[in-house]
Image (spheres, rainbow, N blue to C red):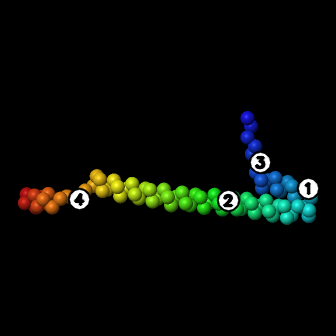
Amino acid sequence: MARRTRTKTCECIRYVEKSPEKNKITLFFLLAQDAIRNDTIAQLLERRQEFDEREHNRAVNEFRALHQQPFAQSSKIVLILY
């Protein structure tokens, strides 16, 4: 199956070229819809990035807590004595 590569913006421009005065309002609303959709996508991506950063920080903290324990006091004393 062939994919359609035409975007709404291209359709809007072609639509206005046929009758420029009559369809300016339609073009404005179609372009506004594109802008709103793009803004929504950008907000979703920002939220996802913030979530991913929090999850990464949580995982790093968990790893440090489990696998990078500081030396116990007794170990320090032994190290100092030797």
Label pair 3/2, CB-CB below 8 angstroms = no
- Picture residue at 43% right of the left edge, 56% below the top: 56
Residue 19: percent from left, percent from top: 92, 58
Q: For the residues marked 3 and 2, what is the alpha-carbon distance in whole angstroms?
A: 17 Å
Type of amino acid under label 3: Arg
CA distance separating discs 2 and 4: 48 Å
- Badge 1 density bin: few <14, some 14–19, many ≥20, Cα 10 Å: few
Of pointers 1 and 2, the one earlier in the residue sequence: 1
What's under tag 2, amino acid-wise? Asn
Give the label on residue 18, or none: 1
Measuring 30% from the left and 56% from the top, which residue is drawn there? 65
Question: On the picture, is 28 further left or further right than 20?
Answer: left
Of label 3 and label 2, which has the lower sequence position? 3
Find residue 20 and report its horizontal and vertical position in percent: 90, 61
Q: Which mark is residue 38?
A: 2
Residues under labels 1 and 4: Cα distance? Answer: 74 Å
Which is nearer the N-term, disc 3 or disc 1?
3
**Circle 1: residue type:** Lys
Hey, what amino acid is under mark 4? Pro
Callout 4 secondary element: loop
Q: Residue at x 78, y 55 (%)?
A: 9
Q: CA distance from mark 3 to mark 4?
A: 60 Å
